[in-house]
Structures are given as structure tokens and as C-alpha cells.
Amino acid sequence: MTFTVFDLSGIQVSEIETDIFQQPIRTELILRAFNHLQSHSYQPKGRYPRAGRDTSAEFFGTGLGLARVPRIKNPPHRGRAAIVTMAVGGRRPHVETPNKVVAKRLNRKERSLATASAAAATADRLLVAKRGHVVENVASIPLVVADELEEVLKTGELMSVADALGLSQDIVRAKQGKKTTGGKASMRGRRTRYPRGPLIVYGSDRGIWEAARNIPGLDCVAARNVSVIHLAPGGVPGRLTVWTSTSLEILSERLADRLRRLVTNV
């Protein structure tokens, strides 16, 4: 199938032929792949094996009219229960162990199929709009841009390109959707949260990553690393995505087997 390629000023310059956007969109597979891939970023959680047990408490013996639990021997807390789970500062029952497997495994072909399906969803205007993106002024869905986009070095220059391609309204939506979180997330450096804005998929980084990193909601990823995590955040397909011509070629090579099966079935 043939798609239009735009330059940095939003003018049609050429056409490109690719079968990436012909893949059937399977939302249940995309959600399953997202949940499995997201689990790879989880940090194993465990407890210190001696937690709640490092104390001099011992059982005083019977005949004292006291429960048969270990008690602290020395003042000022002499006689206070320790170690047992019901005691203040005692051990915790049924704690998680650091060797628990938290990363879920996913078949290679299933992951490839999910990536192809999520990429195809970026070419569906209804899905992109349903996900919340502002697409009224976007030049085309899917949006394919010439490789000159990879050479953009300045954030201001990239914002000018986004305005020419009709992406600026969606970037403003993401910036205005800033939320402040509380609790543990705030204490751990995740105080602010932005909605997901457009995604730029490039073939090779010639400055585009540094130009895009300071724009709230805008993400930038190489075609060799793009996955369901980037194309369908939260497991919801239809992210507003900007593809460069080279990125489509690289992704076609990655998914060559999947695209070959699609052509055979058709």
C-alpha cells in the first residue's frame, strides 16, 4: 500500500510503499503483550531475612502467668513481646522473597505480531482520535515524514515542524494535562505526570532525540527498539505516531516474517 511522505514544512514530496499498516488490529493481543513487556521493568521485591528477628528477646519460661512468646530481657522494654508476628516490631508473615519471578515471558512470534498490530493501529484515524489525540489538523494518518526530521537539533525548530505537520495542538493538550501526584511516587521523583502525546519513530539519531526530550508528552524512539510499550501505552492502541521513511524500512525488516505471512494469507 502506498502512503504520502511529507517534508518538514508539511508539503508532499514523495510516496512510500509498505505493508506494515495492513496488519489486522488485535486489541486483546496488544494488551496482553503490553502487560508482559511492562513486567520486565519491575524490580524484584524482598525482605531482609533477619527482619524482626535481630533482637535479644527470649522465652522466659512457664509459671509466670505470661503468654509463651519471646520477650525483651533488658530495660526499658523488659517483658515486651518481640519476634512473633503479633508483636510490635516483630517479623512479618508470608513475606515476598527476592527470588520470586516477576517478569512474564512472551513468545517471540506473539511479541512480533503484537508490535505489527500496534503499528497498524497508528494508521487508523478513528482509533487515534478515540485515544484522545487531537488529529483535526494532522496532515495525514499515518504520518510519514522525510528523513530530514532526524537531523533536527533544536527544540524550537522541532516545535516549528510539529506546527507545520499539525501536531502542535496535541502537544499543547499533553502539556496542559500535567498532574501532580502525591505519596510514594512524589517522594521518588515522579511528582509530575503528563498524558501521552505524539511519538516520533526514527531510523538513526542525528540529533532528533535531544531536540524532543524536553517537550512534555512527546516521546522519541528508534525503529529497532520500538515496541507495544511505545505504540500502545497502557495497552490502548492508536497512538499518534510520526514515522520517518527509514524507520518504516527498518521496521519492515524486523517484521519481515510477519508481513510475509500477511501477504501469503491475502
Image (spheres, rainbow, N blue to C red):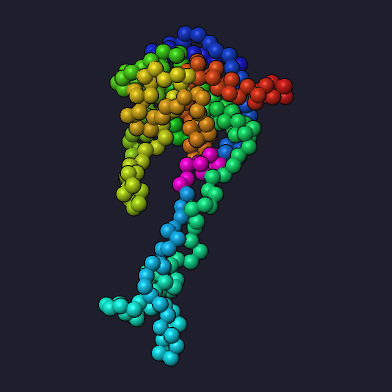
Residue furthest right as drawn: 265
- The quarter of the rendered structure image containing the N terminus is top right
Q: Nearer the viewer, residue 146 or 58?
A: 58
Query: In which quarter of the view is residue 110 placed?
Result: top right
- Seen at 34% across and 23% down, the residue is 211
Left or right: 250, with 164 as reference point: right
Q: Note whether 108 is above or below 165 in the view shown.
A: below
Residue 124, given in percent of the width and then of the height, sits at 55, 27
- Seen at 50% across and 28% down, the residue is 225
Q: Note whether 204 is above or below 30 in the view shown.
A: above
Residue furthest left as drawn: 76
Query: In which quarter of the view is residue 2 placed?
Result: top right
- Seen at 55% across and 27% down, the residue is 119
**Majority secondary structure of magenta residues:** helix
Residue 187, given in percent of the width and then of the height, sits at 31, 49
Query: In which quarter of the view is residue 198 placed?
Result: top left
Question: Range of the magenta residues?
Answer: 34-43
Q: Can residue 127 be seen in this view?
A: no
Tag count: 0
Residue 26, given in percent of the width and then of the height, sits at 61, 35
Q: Which of 69 and 108 is in front in this view?
A: 69
Residue 150, given in percent of the width and then of the height, sits at 41, 17
Q: Can residue 210 be seen in this view?
A: yes
- Seen at 45% across and 71% down, the residue is 85
Residue furthest top as drawn: 13
Q: Is residue 36 magenta?
A: yes
- The quarter of the rendered structure image containing the C terminus is top right
Left or right: 104, with 56 as reference point: right
Q: Does the magenta stretch include residue 3?
A: no
Q: Which of 204 and 237 is in front in this view?
A: 204
